[in-house]
Image (tube, rainbow, N blue to C red):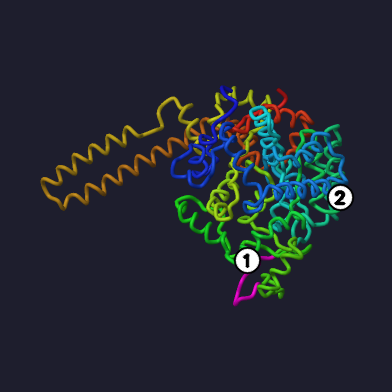
Amino acid sequence: MPTDCISYQNSGYFSPLMNDYLNQKTELQSLYHRFPTLENFEEQIEEKKSNFNDNGNSNSNDNLKRQTLVSVLKKQYAELTVSAETSNHIELLNQPNTFTITTGHQLNLFSGPLYFLYKIISTINLTTELKAKYPDYNFIPVYWMATEDHDFEEINYFSFKGKKFHWNRDSKGPVGRLSTEGLADFLEIYALEIGSSTNANTLKKLFEDSYLNHNNLADATRYLANALFGAHGLVILDADHQDLKRSFIPYIKDELLHQTSFKAVTETIEKIKDYSIQVNPREINLFYIEDDLRERIIFENNIYKVNHTKIEFTETEILALLESNPEKFSPNVIMRPLYQEVILPNLCYIGGGGEIAYWFELKSFFAAAKVTFPTLLLRNSVLLATEKQNKKADKLNLTWSDLFSKQAALVNRITQKLSEFPIDFSEQKEALKKQFEALLELANHTDKSFLGAVKAQEVKQTKGLETLEKRLLIAQKRKFHDELQRIIDLQNELFPNQSLQERQANFSEFYLENGEHLISQLMNQLKPLEQNFNIITLGI
């Protein structure tokens, strides 16, 4: 194959908004702070250094927030075997010259789709690049676990070689607090599918140690991510914690009383209405949570109510609850980014296209809250291929650009290339068009009532040519069926369900064949600041 990457913009899998961002279109510059280049991090560091405190107060607040963060992390890691790299990173968070690079992800069962790995590796590798560029500072990779989400249907499965493995149970509250009971039966079914090779046994033990030896989904996911990336110094944070929420009280209070986020985000959405809007704000962008409950807080008739329940508060009562139990308040997708940037000394958020799109809606909200807006970086995207698949593509004379094409367009293009004569009737259509232009001119100078008949005949003959063109294409597809089928089969292997592999397959499918080399190869090859969709041939 002639290349091992394709630009995001040319891949065909990113939205117009993302493509315009990557092209640094002038119209979008008000939606983000600094474009992610190595040089632009210098100003980001200086700004975050001076603003990482509570509403501009003294730096003692910065120290308090760092101490709280470190204290919570140590409690959360208390039952884990912690690598020297991660332990050192947690301690470094106490230092004023230490900053984080953060990615976030749902608590998908057994990590969910492949891009879980790519998010975290992008984050780790960016901290390495920043340390080389700015050696006077420390940069810590953080995985923010989305423990407060409550949409269990989004995370209760993963796919292995085209088969979906579902965890069927009820869940109503924040998923991080959900019991892992029942996953032993799940493991039995999965274990039968992967066999008994050395790598298969490693996967089974990893699943068992993660999910059967931990009581809830947050602890299980922390164990899994630590097992995969602890050696690289990844710090894993569960922000569903009273001490961390206490730092966020002023912003929760403002949301309850003034609905600042709704006003600011609604104004921003109006500016980008020509693009697809990722999320729409509520009047109050907070949930009330308990172990088995996460429901929206709504304000009606001067009373704060918890949706779908009988729980309600006066203003005095809800503010008193906020002071005594801030952990009962959970930010939604609009407020969560602000919460992250308030409690972390963070420089950059790394996410997928959908995530970056909703961050674009938040810039004016951050300005109103007087919190530094982070640099936004599109995570690495990867297509994993085998040597055998590479050889097939070479034999079929396919480029990566071909394989990234939509299947119908690819098949049509290859059919035309294989055909001994042109299937494209553009010349004939153009000649026909000129003939009818002459006829229309003639009709204009003679009997204008003749115009309608000429136009109708033009439409009829043009449609006739198009029908012949389609029939000829179908006939040629039948003729080249075997070769076209090989192309379709290869593309379906690389793009399951005609979608991105990284959104379909679980890492275990590739770990089964490659073991630990899978992660080490990804670590070595992914460059987070390069705007390329990487094609990685495994085993090389």
Could you tell me residue 236's position as x and y percent?
Answer: 76, 44
Q: Is residue 444 visible?
A: yes
Taking the image as shown, residue 201 lies to the left or right of residue 325, namely right
Q: Relative to 302, is 24 above or below?
A: above
Numbered-mark total: 2
Residue at (61, 40) in percent of width and height: 500
Quick one: 105 or 144, which is closer to the camera?
Answer: 144
Q: In which quarter of the image is the N terminus?
A: top right
Q: Which residue is drawn at 79% across and 30% down?
A: 516
Q: Does the magenta stretch include residue 53?
A: no
* 214 sits left or right of 161 in the view: right
Decide whether the magenta segment is chiefly helix, strand or loop.
strand
Residue 140, image quadrant = top right
Specify the quadrant of the image occupied by residue 233: top right
**Quadrant in the rendering for residue 519:** top right
Q: Which residue occupies 52% across, 42% down?
A: 18
Specify the label residue 256 is tagged with: 1
The type of residue carrying mark 2 is His
Q: Marks 2 and 1, how far apart in space? A: 36 Å
Which marked residue is nearer to the observer: mark 2 or mark 1?
Answer: 1
The image shows residue 503 at horizontal and vertical percentages of: 65, 43
As helix, strand or loop, the secondary structure at mark 2 comes to loop
In-image side of 452 versus 155 (left or right)? left
Establish if 325 lies above or below 37. below
Q: Decide: is 452 above or below 135.
A: below
Q: Quarter holding the C terminus?
A: top right
In the rendered structure, the answer to whether residue 509 lies left or right of residue 278 reads right
**394 or 132, nearer to the observer:** 132
Magenta-drawn segment: 295-304
Q: Name the residue under label 2.
A: 214
Q: Residues within 10 Å of mark 2 (few under 14, many from 20)?
A: some
Q: What residue type is labelled 1?
A: Leu
